[in-house]
Amino acid sequence: MEISVDNNKPTNLQGKGEKMVTRKFGVEIGNNRRTISAINLKGGAQINTFVVNKRALSQANGNNENSVVTNVNRPITRKLAAQIANKKQCLPEDVLKPKKSAESFKIFEDEEDQPVPMALETIEPEKDLMEVEMEDIFEEPVIDIDVSDAKNTLAVVEYVEDLYAHYRRMESHSMVSPNYMLTQQSDINEKMRAILIDWLIEVHHKFDLQHETLFLTVNLIDRFLAKQSVVRKKLQLVGLVAMLLACKYEEVSVPVVGDLIFISDKAYSRSDILEMEKLMLNTLEFNISVPTPYVFLKRYLKAARSDSKLDQISFFLMELCLVEYETVKFAPSFLAAASVYTAQCSLYGFKQWSKTCQWHTNYSEDQLLECSRMIVGYHQRAATGRLTGVYRKYNTSKFGYAAKCEPAKFIVEEAQ
């Protein structure tokens, strides 16, 4: 016999002459079994019958919201009753019995041996694994710093990486021996060099020249002094001629020889300047085009996504390095990277060196720390002593008072 059940309306199919009974959802079903004697079949014979409880099965299948309460009383044979009884014995015990409510289920703390059901067990996540996964998810990416200049023809985005790779290969040719003052010079020393550079920075500022001119001037001075011995009274002349050559290479409007004579308080004549110019060009073999810290500094500031304030602080620290003879041993790219790193630490108050900066500079934070501590020392002494030209230059509104930025003392204190 087939039984059709309407899932939309709870029904109760019973035999003839019996009333329909409806139950509210959630009320437990009592014992729906009836005795065999209470069932009268055709022919007057009494045989075993079986009542199917639909609700228990529907709850076991998880259909608790729209469960159907149905009692089906139908005649069956002894053989069919035996088969159904066997299937009943195979069903799990929790299906055959009405399920208890969640409130009636309690866990006693004093029963330590009683196992906790799996549904109530709290599974703690593996912290180490989650931390590793979070690090992988939030790993800092390397930013394409040239994507914004794709349409700028002056940025030469197609060739910029090749250009800086060439600069890195050629920078070693623009470097000098860190001991040239001892091996090549006998009448001058590193302190005289520092006085000359500090004075030239003031001259450069008064003439309102380009940054490139100053860096090239210092490079020409060091390379010339590393090959040519100079007496003390000619040292200032070397500085003036180096600036004249740098202006001819970098500037649009070049100072005339008369201007150089005037700022030297007429210590040198026109012929002295022209003679030194010839000597310097021949000594350097007319090799003026060299990568200075300036070209690397501009690139690294772009990688650091800098603003005007970070730019000014970086140039301030970089020019402090130009005055110091002990920085001659560092490659221009390394000195530029250390200046940008120190400037970020000074401005933000904590160590800052992004993956993008490391990628474009090829220097890690650990490599820069020693040089950065030296730069912090220069920064702390910038306003003291006789050589204060850089400090006074960057303590003006034109350069955003960059000299007033607090030094990154914590970098030095960590090493102590």
Image: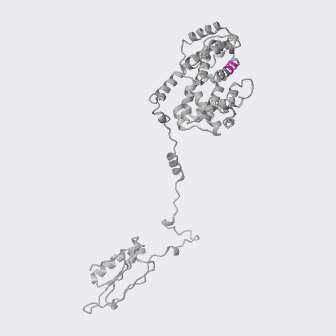
Q: Residue furthest bottom?
A: 44
* Residue drawn at the location 36% of the way across and 88% of the way down: 19
Viewer can see residue 113: yes
Q: Nearer the viewer, residue 167 or 412?
A: 167
The answer to whether residue 81 is left or right of residue 192 is left
User: How has the structure been colored for display?
Assistant: one colour
Q: Is residue 154 magenta?
A: no
What span is colored magenta in the figure? 195-200
Q: Quadrant of the C terminus?
A: top right
Give x and y (percent) for residue 84. 32, 78
Q: Residue at x 50, y 41 (%)?
A: 141
Residue 184 position by quadrant: top right
Q: Is residue 303 found left or right of 15 in the rendered image?
A: right
In the rendered picture of this protein, how many numbered marks are placed on residues? Answer: 0
Q: Relative to the observer, which residue lies in front, 103 or 355?
A: 355
Question: Residue 154 location in percent, x, y?
Answer: 48, 28
Q: Residue furthest left?
A: 43
Estimate the x, y position of residue 328 in percent, counting from the top left: 62, 22
Q: Is residue 363 visible?
A: no
Q: Which quadrant of the view contains residue 43?
A: bottom left
Residue depicted at 36% across the width and 75% down the height: 8
Magenta: predominant secondary structure element? helix
Judged left or right of residue 300, residue 260 is right
Give above or below for 267 relative to 325. above
Residue sitting nearer the eye, 44 or 262: 262
In the displayed orientation, state which residue is furthest to the right: 385
Q: Is residue 199 magenta?
A: yes
Residue 360 spot, x, y in % from top left: 52, 32
User: In what quadrant of the picture does the N terminus appear?
Assistant: bottom left
Q: Describe residue 234's horizontal placement relative to residue 119 as left or right.
A: right
